[in-house]
Amino acid sequence: MRKTAPPRTYRVESFGCQMNVYDGQRMAEMLAEQGILAAPDGNDADLVVLNTCHIRERAAEKIYSRIGRLTKGKDEPPLIAVAGCVAQAEGEEIMHRAPAVSMVVGPQAYHRLPSMLERAVAGIRSTDTDMPPIAKFDALPARRKSAPSAFLTVQEGCDKFCTYCVVPYTRGAEISRPFPDLLNEAERLVDGGAREITLLGQNVNAWTGDDGLGRAIGLAGLIHALAKIPDLLRIRYTTSHPADMDDALVAAHGEIEKLMPYLHLPVQSGSNRVLKAMNRSHTVETYLKLLDRFRSVRPDIALSGDFIVGFPGESEAEFEETLALVDTVGYAAAFSFKYSPRPGTPAATMDGQIAAEVMDDRLQRLQAHLNRDQFAFNEASVGKTCDVLVERKGKLPGQWLGKSPWLQSVHFTGDAAIGDMVTTQLVEALGNSLSGRLVEPAYSRSSPSPK
Ligand code: SAH
Ligand code: SF4
Ligand code: F3S
């Protein structure tokens, strides 16, 4: 690799889950701290960070083709860093296959990106896939400006080892960030304009900490503390694992007004045999009981889940059990995936891998049920009056887009600005969104507080 001038502009491209997006934002903040500017949309950047995800098929291939497009025919190709979960899983391979890449950095090591960049400018390629717990967060710059709805990673990693999943390998063991750090970062986010914070973790409800008075608290305790931040109006959290749910978190949904009535609780399958083969530690029955407990404290709670079709050995009858579970729950939203064998996971070498056509057919049938229920949920919301946090402009003049408490996209026209909390009446359910009518303009406006 040749020496090159220090980059003046950067772009971070994030391909993964919400935590991957959070990591992407933190990397962008670090680069900005170095005086590097975000490249305007549509413009080439001197430094491109590909923040990758390893959960789906062909993740690595897509990255190689992106690298090809970034460099092909360019006299001065950008410096390229590959970050995220593919970097963790295939770091050496990337270095070997893609000479255009000068930095490979795993999701627990990206705080070292600035020093790797210095080396890259001097013509030295480097890989860092260490997993030092917490160190990353301590090394990141303080948060300054924030969108109305912000992410905050509170817990990272996974000890669950579902047999299909790479996350325990790419993100490492479960760790909880310390309570004071989280309180501080949340306050900074709110100072910077955030009105809603979504607490993130691969198993967010496994978060534990010390409240500063020597008492052990769980996620509910953290939410109670964050709810005291005056200008923070909404709190959400994702993703929970059924095995880590405690009474306090269920109760919190009945106690804390700022905690939004929404629960994303992946179930994966409606067959107990498949759940066991997946190493999911819950059954259909324990999962349904858990949902009942949430509904008893918060009857309007919107439920969401993740599903995998075509896990090795899944029979037609077992798949139909998933459809039956969906029909029982009535999800407001859901993510559904075809099983994808991930190298190194136990399920990848299990007998009974399912043919692609069978998976396609099952996914279509499952999505027909899920879409039907999502639409029914939106239809049932028509007529309700609710708060909407305005996140961006809509396509039409004077139109705004935001989220309802149940995480539905709502658009309306009228006097508003990004960061406003307004009251709307929901008037019509469309495919993936609702249209609303402005009832009361902003009662809270999220302009960053003057410093
Ligand atoms: N506990 C994390 C899981 C992240 S992965 C969380 O829930 O956020 C998100 C979803 O991807 C999982 O719930 C699962 O439905 C799906 N998934 C993970 N590995 C998969 C695989 N090998 N094939 C298909 N879907 C998978
Ligand atoms: Fe993956 Fe299971 Fe851990 Fe979720 S709980 S990250 S699906 S191993
Ligand atoms: Fe993907 Fe890593 Fe998230 S594999 S889903 S970016 S934890």
Image (cartoon, helix red, strand yellow):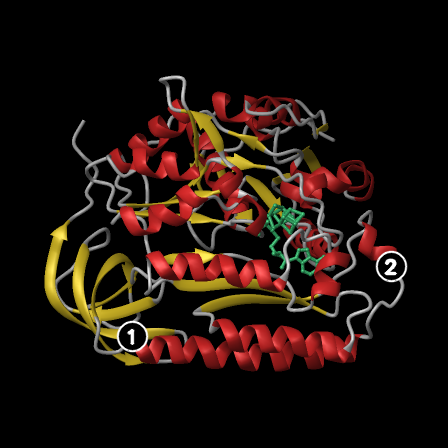
Horizontally, is 150 left or right of 255 in the view?
right
- Residue sitting nearer the eye, 386 or 415: 386
Report the amino acid beneath label 1: Ser
Ligand 1 sits in quadrant: bottom right
Disc 2 crowd rating (10 Å Cα; few below 14, some 14-19, many 20+) is some
- Residue at image location 81% in from the left, 56% down from the top: 347
Q: Secondary structure at mark 1?
A: helix
Q: Secondary structure at mark 2?
A: loop
Q: Which residue is mark 1?
A: 381
Picture quadrant where residue 360 is located: bottom right
Q: Which residue is mark 2?
A: 350
| Vertical placement of residue 439 versus 104, above or below | below
Residue 24 showing in the rendered view? no
Picture quadrant where residue 183 is located: top left
| Residue 115, numbered label | none
Q: Is mark 2 within 8 Å of ligand 1?
A: no
Q: Position of residue 60 (x, y in %)?
A: 73, 52
- Mark pair 2, 1: CA separation: 43 Å
Q: Position of residue 224 (x, y in %)?
A: 31, 37
Report the amino acid beneath label 2: Met
| Vertical placement of residue 321 versus 95, above or below | below
Marks 2 and 1, the one that precedes in the sequence: 2
Horizontally, is 91 left or right of 158 in the view?
right
Residue 357 showing in the rendered view? yes
| Vertical placement of residue 115 versus 324, above or below | above
